[in-house]
Structure formats: structure tokens, C-alpha cells
Amino acid sequence: MQERIQGRAFRYVCFILAVAISALVWIAGEANAEHGGKHGPTFQIQCDAMQPFVFDAIKPPPHHLHTPYGNTAIDSDSTFRTLAKNTETTCKREWHNSAYWNPVVREGGERMTPVQVKAYYTALGDQSKVHNMPPGAEMIGDVARYRCGIGDESRSSVWPIYGCEQDKFEITVFFPSCWDRDGKTYEHFRYPDGTKCPLGTVKIPRLRLSTIHDAADDRLDEPLHVSAGAGEWAGPRTFHADAMFVDTRPGDTDSAMSEFNALVERCIRQVGDTEARPSGCG
């Protein structure tokens, strides 16, 4: 057990260094590359939030408070196999038993639970080259944006927009969308350089996890803090999210994955950047 924890810690440090470099290059053009409205290659999966608790199924301990979504069996000991055995999910597409989680957010001294959670799967660049998501993928998203409001007039920033006079604000985390096919732990996934994946990697659907929160008194005044340890809270730049991609059911290993891959084909590969999405993509 100790060797496993040390190994996870070493891999995580190496991963963070690599992500920091690639994310600086990638985030500059990200806002212009987003597909919005009802057009472009995207589908969404809505999920409900579960009660926060101290866990992390990917990063090494010590762990801190996270809010989980999706697979109800998620905990610090979860693996692809244990999650695949569970058929319970908080997601609206009942076959989707992948797991997502992010640190708890606090406004002033008040903990906040998202009122709406959406996992968007999309693609940048040539959608025809998108590979299917690898079952068992463990991913960490370290690129976050904050949005004041959720409508067409909303504003986004890499920093919370304090003084935001809207009844809601949104935090979106962008995940790597390039895979080296040598493994499924987080260090095998990279951010693209613009719309191009690094040499030796292939393009997979790009996940962005969006959590929408109510703003107290329709205004975001207090500084936001992010759970960072036992009783510890850090600044909003530390916000991130994690995902374990499952979509496999016991005794029926193909149906859930077929549902997901069918959405990839219909809503991503067959939809151009400016084309209207088919019904059912969200």
C-alpha cells in the first residue's frame, strides 16, 4: 500500500509539471475555440451533485473535501473495475456510470453545492480524427474558467468575477483531449497545442465539466476558496476536477459504451463547427 501511494505521488508531481507548461500555451486560444449554443460538435450529460466527503480516487493522499457526480460508488479506493460493477448514477443518461468530482467551493465561510452539473464532450479541429474515449481513463483537468451568469451576456475569466450581479455563476474545468495510448492513468493524457495534439498522441473527445452555483443575494461578493486539505482552504486558481471514465456495466460490457460511442459519432464526428447539432445531443 505504501509503495502504491508513493508511486501515485511521484506520477502526480510529474504530471502537474507537464500540464502547467502545456496549459499555458493552450488556454490562450481556448475561449475562441468553444462551441456554444446549439451548434458545433458537442453533446452533454447532466448529473446531480452528491454530498461532499473527503476522498480522491486518482491523486495520492492526503485528501480533502470533494463534491462527486455520476457513479454513486466513488471513493478513494475506486478503480475502473469497482465502478463498472455499480449501476447507480446521478446522471440523467442512466447508462452513464462514469465518475466526476471537484473540490468543494466556499464563498466567505459558506460551503456551496452546485445546483446544476453538465459534462460536455466536444472536439477541437478535425472532428473526423476523434478516437473513442478509452474505458478506464483517469483524467485530471487543471484549466478552469469562471463565468458571471449563464446567459448570452455572461462574462468569463480565469479569475472569479467579484461584484458579479447575476443570480448564478459558473465554473468550468477543461480536461486534456490527447492520449498517448500507452496507459490510462492521468499522466497519459495531454492538452492540445491549439487544435493539434502533441506528436505521438491521438485526439479524443474533449471533456469540460461545468458546475453552476447560486450567488447569494444575486451578487458574488465574498472571496471564493477551494478545499485544499484537512480544514485548509486555498485560492480559486487551485480549482480543478477529476474524472474516471467507465460506461461499462456488469455482464453487459458493450451497451453503455455503445451508447456513448454512438453520441461521439452522431454529435461530434458528423457535426461541423458551425452546423446545428442533431436532437438528443443537448
Image (cartoon, rainbow, N blue to C red):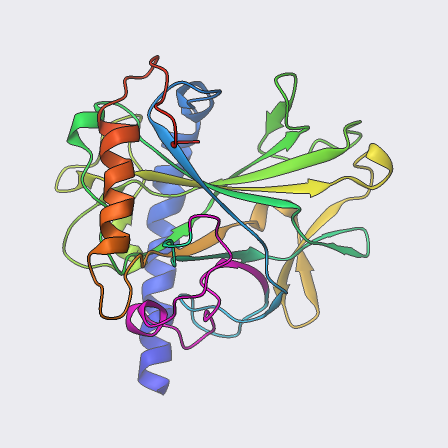
Q: Residue lying at the far right in this picture: please name it.
A: 217
Q: Locate residue 23: give its quadrant.
A: top left
Quadrant housing the N terminus: bottom left
Residue 26: where, in percent of width, then height?
37, 31
Question: In the image, what residue occupies the spot 30% across and 40% down?
Answer: 177
Question: In the image, what residue occupies the spot 40% across and 55% down?
Answer: 243
Quadrant housing the C terminus: top left
For residue 10, above or below residue 201: below
Residue 71: where, in percent of width, then height?
44, 63
State which region is magenta.
66-93
Residue 263 as seen in the image, left or right of residue 5 = left
Classified by dominant secondary structure, the portion drawn in magenta counts as loop
Q: Is residue 94 magenta?
A: no
Q: Is residue 75 magenta?
A: yes
Q: Residue lying at the far top in this picture: please name it.
A: 274
Looking at the picture, tell me which residue is in the foreground, 86 or 31: 86
Residue 263 as seen in the image, left or right of residue 78 = left
Residue 223 as seen in the image, left or right of residue 101 = right
Residue 160: where, in percent of width, then height?
67, 36
Question: In the image, what residue occupies the spot 68% across and 35% down?
Answer: 169
For residue 177, above or below residue 65: above
Residue 138: where, in percent of width, then height?
33, 58
Looking at the picture, tell me which residue is in the foreground, 66 or 18: 66
For residue 29, above or below residue 261: above
Q: Please count the marks in the image.
A: 0
Q: Residue lying at the far bottom in this picture: please name it.
A: 1
Looking at the picture, tell me which residue is in the foreground, 51 or 77: 51
